[in-house]
Amino acid sequence: MSRARVAWLALVIIVGCTPVPTWETAREYRLLSATPLDATYGCVVSVTDSLGYTVRASDRAGGFVRVERYYVPYVHWQARDLINVSTIPRGDARATLRLTAWTEETHRDLFGPTDISPRVLADATQLAARCGGGPLTVWSDTART
């Protein structure tokens, strides 16, 4: 085998054995709301608006709100923070809130996964505190490798 092939094979083995980066791409919270179901939906819309998010999809009867906020981090072209909120009715006219928060960054208009911005995590926590009032549980952290 020639030296070039041996060098190429060694490079392929080294590159193939390098660790794959992992991003924490989403965080999901669940909490019991202390307010009535109808008031919880209005609170979610109001608080996300005050935090600078734009409602992209909502269904009051279905108990779903999706909000996003665009911004420009100093190292990327554009990014957006997203929060999905689902209100799941309980038997006592209250709700369980399910909040999913994540960040996407774009380079030339192609959005891809990235680490969650600290700001969207703070916003989701604030939203949970103001509209939920019940005990907050980090339901899951999802990672992409």
Image: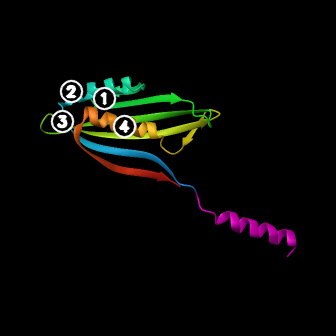
Q: Amino acid at mark 1?
A: Val
Residue that extends furthest to the left in the rendered view of this protein: 92
Amino acid at pointer 3? Ala
User: Front-most of 29 and 65?
Assistant: 29
Q: Name which of mark 1 and mark 3 comes first in the sequence.
A: 3
Q: Is residue 9 magenta?
A: yes
| Residues packed near mark 1 inside 10 Å, few (<14), some (14 to 19) or many (20 plus) | many
Instruction: Of the two numbered discs 1 and 4 on the same chain, state the one appearing first in sequence.
Output: 1
**Residue at (70% x, 67% y) in the render:** 14
Could you give the CA–CA distance between mark 3 and mark 2, rounded to whole angstroms?
12 Å
Q: Which residues are magenta?
A: 1-20
Q: Is residue 49 left or right of residue 41?
A: right
Give the residue at x 52% y 38%: 104
Of the residues tagged 2 and 4, which is closer to the observer?
4
State whether the magenta stretch is mostly helix, strand or loop.
helix
Which structural element holds mark 2?
helix
x and y, in percent, of residue 46 in the image: 32, 23
Q: SS class of the residue under badge 1?
A: helix
List x then y, in percent, for residue 82: 44, 35
Which of the two discs, 2 and 4, labels the residue nearer the N terminus? 2
- For the residue labelled by badge 4, is the local secondary structure a helix, a strand or a loop? helix
* Residue at which label 4 appears: 124
Give the amino acid type for the residue marked by disc 4 in the picture.
Answer: Ala
Name the residue type under label 2. Answer: Asp
Residue 62 figure quarter: top left
Residue 129 in the figure: left or right of residue 57: left
What is the CA distance from the residue labelled 2 to the residue labelled 1? 10 Å
For the N terminus, which image quadrant? Answer: bottom right
